């Protein structure tokens, strides 16, 4: 029978042994030293000058000096004025107080467990807060995950995630799930083109957009959604850029969705109701659609819609819309011509008249007509100094064989430009 235990080497009391308390106390001292092992340091090459009773150290120096001579690799304990060493065995663990690190003895040397963990390589599976399996060999269960650039090495300042596949016919993609059922895929899916695919059920997928690997051009899904004309015809909720509006109801709104763009086609005689605060139309008046008429409609940040570039299927231009022909006004005609008009009554015979809106290019001509007055006098109007912003109006009166300037004569004028 051995006189020591096989693992910690604790001395055993022999039969008929005298002074059994010595052996017993030695075993207790070793247990006190080695159980829940926590050492003060491992970097000393000789005993510290003023050790305290029970101090423990790891001796890792190749040739320690003083009372530690010959104790390299051992756990040493100070007691009763003497340093005692214990030879470790593979698998022993020691906590290094000065480093706040756990060390393990592998049978030859003491190794930092934290440094071992940071150098882990070729792990077959890794689960963080969850279990990894044969398919998901890396599994993370958390509210968030962060990948950031290396500021310790330091690195380049870049952070790249590489998703590599075997061939163009395979997938390299991020898959977004709801209840472990796929709802969207983003990546190179079955080709070198980059695409976004979406699904309502995890099995049937529709391609929302594709970026060509060859040209870089982006192609959006072009499906057309049909909506029945109604007082509120919700283009923003259609889910596609192309919308077919059916029926002949009056449409006062395209919904409240903000910042949307829709390409709209009509199949019937619906009535679009002009409202600058809800549905602004290019004619500034109600508009009756016809089959295969098309337009582009956009909404602003407040959900107000505007119709742009309305095109009739038969090619005829839009009517200019209802105009209130007041004393002053303007209208843009099909083809780009602009007509402006006004009424001038000035105290002076010669007066500068400014157009309500300057013509973008040029003024082609101005015509003026004074309102006939009472009595035998005849009135005439002349136009000069014509420019894109206005002109000079000169009113004259002929009476008793003489012509003189006349003020306070109501005069209508009409200008044409582009």
Image: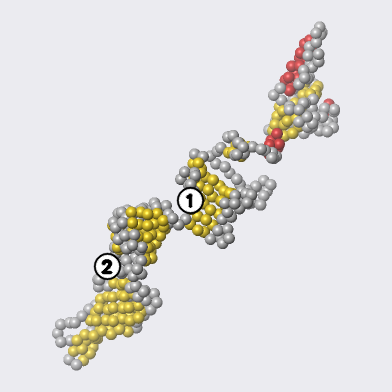
Q: Residue 206 has which mark?
A: 1
In the image: residue 116, left or right of residue 286: right
Q: CA distance from mark 1 to mark 2?
A: 45 Å
What residue sits 17% from the left and 86% below the top?
377
Height in image: 363 above or below 110?
A: below
Q: Is residue 45 found left or right of 291 in the rendered image?
A: right
Q: Position of residue 354 (x, y in %)?
A: 32, 76
Residue at 74 percent of width and 22 percent of height: 33
Quarter location, residue 82: top right
Residue 83 x/y as whole percent: 80, 23
Q: Where residue 376 sits: x, y (%)?
A: 15, 87
How many numbered marks, from 0 up? 2
The residue under the point 57% across, 42% down is 145
> The residue tagged with tag 2: helix, strand or loop?
loop
Pair 1/2: label in front:
1
Q: Nearer the viewer, residue 409 or 282?
A: 282
Crowding around mark 1 (Cα neighbors within 10 Å: few <14, some 14 to 19, many 20+) is few
Q: Which mark is residue 322?
A: 2
Out of 368 and 121, give the one closest to the viewer.
Answer: 121
The C terminus lies in which quarter of the figure?
Answer: bottom left
Color encoding of the figure? secondary structure
Would residue 168 be seen by someone viewing this image from the given angle?
A: yes
Q: Nearer the viewer, residue 385 or 181?
A: 181
Q: Would residue 301 be seen by someone viewing this image from the given angle?
A: no
Question: The N terminus is located in which quarter?
Answer: top right
Is residue 15 left or right of 384 when viewed as pictured? right
């Amino acid at each position: 029978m051995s006189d020591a235990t096989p693992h910690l080497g604790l001395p055993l009391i022999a039969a008929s042994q005298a002074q059994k308390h010595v052996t017993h106390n030695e075993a207790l001292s070793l247990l006190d030293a080695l159980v829940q092992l926590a050492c003060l340091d491992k970097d000393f090459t000789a005993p510290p000058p003023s050790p305290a009773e029970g101090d423990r150290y790891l001796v890792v120096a190749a040739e320690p000096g003083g009372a530690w001579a010959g104790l390299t690799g051992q756990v040493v304990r100070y007691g009763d004025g003497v340093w005692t060493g214990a030879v470790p065995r593979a698998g022993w663990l020691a906590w290094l107080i000065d480093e706040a690190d756990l060390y393990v003895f592998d049978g030859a040397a003491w190794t930092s467990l934290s440094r071992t963990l940071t150098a882990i390589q070729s792990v077959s599976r890794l689960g963080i807060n969850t279990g990894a399996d044969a398919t998901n060999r890396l599994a993370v269960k958390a509210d968030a995950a962060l990948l950031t650039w290396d500021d310790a090495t330091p690195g380049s300042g870049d952070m790249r995630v590489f998703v590599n596949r075997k061939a163009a016919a395979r997938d390299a993609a991020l898959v977004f799930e709801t209840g472990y059922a796929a709802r969207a895929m983003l990546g190179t899916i079955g080709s070198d083109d980059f695409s976004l695919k979406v699904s309502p059920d995890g099995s049937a997928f529709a391609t929302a957009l594709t970026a060509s690997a060859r040209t870089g051009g982006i192609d959006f899904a072009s499906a057309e959604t049909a909506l029945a004309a109604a007082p509120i015809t919700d283009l923003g909720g259609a889910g596609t850029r192309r919308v077919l509006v059916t029926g002949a109801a009056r449409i006062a709104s395209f919904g409240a969705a903000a910042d949307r763009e829709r390409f709209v086609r009509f199949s019937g005689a619906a009535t679009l109701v002009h409202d600058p605060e809800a549905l602004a139309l290019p004619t500034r008046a109600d508009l009756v659609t016809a089959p295969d008429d098309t337009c582009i409609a956009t909404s602003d940040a407040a959900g107000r819609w505007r119709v742009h570039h309305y095109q009739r299927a038969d090619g005829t231009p839009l009517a200019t819309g209802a105009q209130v022909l007041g004393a002053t006004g303007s209208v843009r005609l099909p083809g780009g011509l602009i007509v402006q008009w006004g009424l001038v009554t000035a105290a002076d015979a010669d007066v500068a008249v400014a157009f309500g809106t300057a013509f973008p290019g040029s003024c082609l001509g101005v015509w003026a007509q004074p309102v006939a007055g009472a009595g035998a006098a005849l009135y005439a109007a002349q136009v000069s100094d014509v420019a894109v912003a206005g002109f000079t109006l000169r009113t004259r009166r002929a009476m008793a064989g003489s012509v003189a300037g006349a003020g306070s004569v109501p005069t209508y004028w009409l200008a044409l430009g582009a």
